[in-house]
Amino acid sequence: MNMRNSLVPAAALLALLLSACGGGSSSSAPTASTPVPPSSSLVRVSEASPYAAGCGGTGGTSYQDAEVEPYIAINPGNPSNLVAAWQQDRWSTGGAHGLVAGSSTDGGKTWKEHTLPLSVCAGGSKANGGDFERASDPWVSISPNGDAYLISISFSGDTLQPGSSGAVLVSRSADGGASWSDAATLIRDGASAFNDKESITADPTDSHFVYAVWDRLTTDNHGAAMFARTTDGGATWEKAVAIYDPGVNNQTIGNEIVVASDGTVLDVFEEIDDTSSNTDSNATLRIITSADHGATWSTPTTIADNLAVGTVDPNSGQPIRSGSGLPQAAAGPGGMLAVVWEDGRFSGGYHDDIAYASSKDDGAHWSKPVEINSVHATPAFTPTVAILGDGTIGVSYFDFRNNAGGTDLPTDYWFTSSTDGTHWSEQHISGPFDMTLAPDAEGLFVGDYQALGKVGSTFVPFFVQTDDAGTDDRTDAFYLPPQPRPLVATHRISRVSLAVETPAPSSGFRHRVHENIMRVLRDEDPVWDTIRAQRQSQHQPPMD
């Protein structure tokens, strides 16, 4: 990887913020944001839940009014139009009452909320295709023509158990997110399969094409990457197909489509191999590419091993359900690609840091991973990446640097940027907030991904944090509008990241990686222990 010593341009920087909450909006009409201190421009996007507390089945704890797992898209033809989505009323045992979309027509100053018929709580039915108890994993993307696409994993019952069902559903908006169509069903399964961790990407060069990708776990112990596309702007969707199957007892997870500057379509994912093993499952970040809008795909290229060990509350040991196991990717100019993820290699397996790797040739070759979070002594987790048109890289993430021990867990959200992948300039987005107030869904949970958009020459984060309201309103989604600041006011190199040889993981380190892989799979599927026992009883050697 060629390194250039250059400073980050001022236009790529975010303003330093306090942790005050911004204003929200009405679910029926735009309203002015609640006044906030002049030193902060943070806007609260989410409001009280539009869903009844008793809807959506039973089983587990429902955290009413809790929002988690946000995503955002900016209209490429009208940057004042933003569309966001999140899970609403998270369940401890998976999914939420439903998904909610937020739309803004004034650059994120005010927002309107909209329910989507992707679960029964939001009006889903057999007639409109949304007859599922719960919905999860929202992702949203906007085509060059302004059409927005929102995707959901919707499901009923216990995964892979008798009577269960699930689907990948897409709703489209042709009016900036103000109204949404009934669901288009990309795939629907009964108890023999479970579709998980989907994402959707509108082709930035052609509004006819939109791509959806996810992993599909089956009772015959496969976890292929599944793909579906529309070639007519959402009027119809082609039948979902497997584009990569790593073989029996193995699976993909965290599939995300990005489109390179030359139009190449790329699927970045984590491959988890030999999950029937008791001790030595492996995780690898990989990429496959398509030069024909997803009609055919290459064999995989390896980006790096994922040596994540997971994150826990350092005060109590309670698990934090972070983005471990879910790489985040972005494409930039001139064949540039960037991937970020959690990794334990820089601490010798003691905790996770934020790893970054890049490619300059559309993913054919990759740099060695480097650590980019500025405080090495504390866990850093759930990174998100975006790239501006001039090649400036932006990454947001959480860490615990302000934790001093105690019953609460002060957590901050940070942003770091670089023009060369070596020199990084960090700024504070929000916090500290108390992570212990978050919903407990196989660990304290604000989402295993957050969002980082871009408006012109500025990065704009969209994220979830806990509220001072405590258990009555545990979390909300927040947006930071563009905040360019003069270079002299904010710029400071906080880390120089150079690729260095790290020692081979010890057996203890490898075991922690394995245990984290098991936690990631259990987080995504509460009946994972049952699936794992089945795989062990039917174990076959992994396919070549």
Image: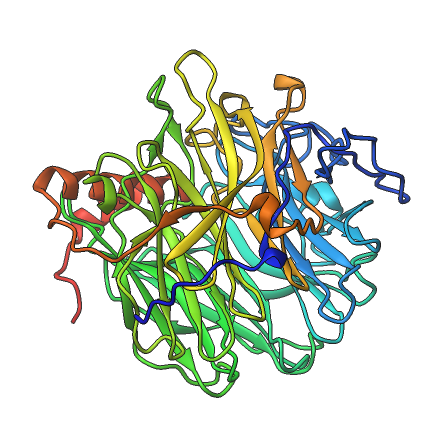
Q: Residue at x 74, y 60 (%)?
A: 182
Counting from the top left corner in percent of width and height, residue 487 is at 59, 51
Q: Residue at x 64, y 25 (%)?
A: 467
Q: Residue at x 43, y 70 (%)?
A: 337
In the foreground, 292 or 21: 21
Quadrant of the rendering where the N terminus is positioned: bottom left
Side (left or right) of 508 relative to 70: left
Counting from the top left corner in percent of width and height, residue 259 is at 52, 75
Residue that lies at the very extreme toward the bottom in this rendered image: 292
Counting from the top left corner in percent of width and height, residue 8 is at 51, 58
Vertical arrangement, residue 395 with respect to residue 377, above or below: below
Vertical arrangement, residue 332 with respect to residue 394, above or below: below
Q: Dividing the picture into quarters, in which one does residue 229 lie?
A: bottom right
> How does the figure colour the protein chain or chains?
rainbow
Residue that lies at the very extreme toward the front in this rendered image: 488
Q: Residue at x 16, y 51 (%)?
A: 502
In the foreground, 379 or 239: 379
Residue that lies at the very extreme toward the top in this rendered image: 406
Side (left or right) of 191 relative to 208: left
How many marks can you see? Answer: 0
In the foreground, 443 or 396: 396
Mark yes or no: residue 138 visible: no
Mark yes or no: residue 223 visible: yes
Quadrant of the rendering where the C terminus is positioned: bottom left
Counting from the top left corner in percent of width and height, residue 206 is at 65, 82
Side (left or right) of 308 relative to 429: left
In the foreground, 396 or 63: 396
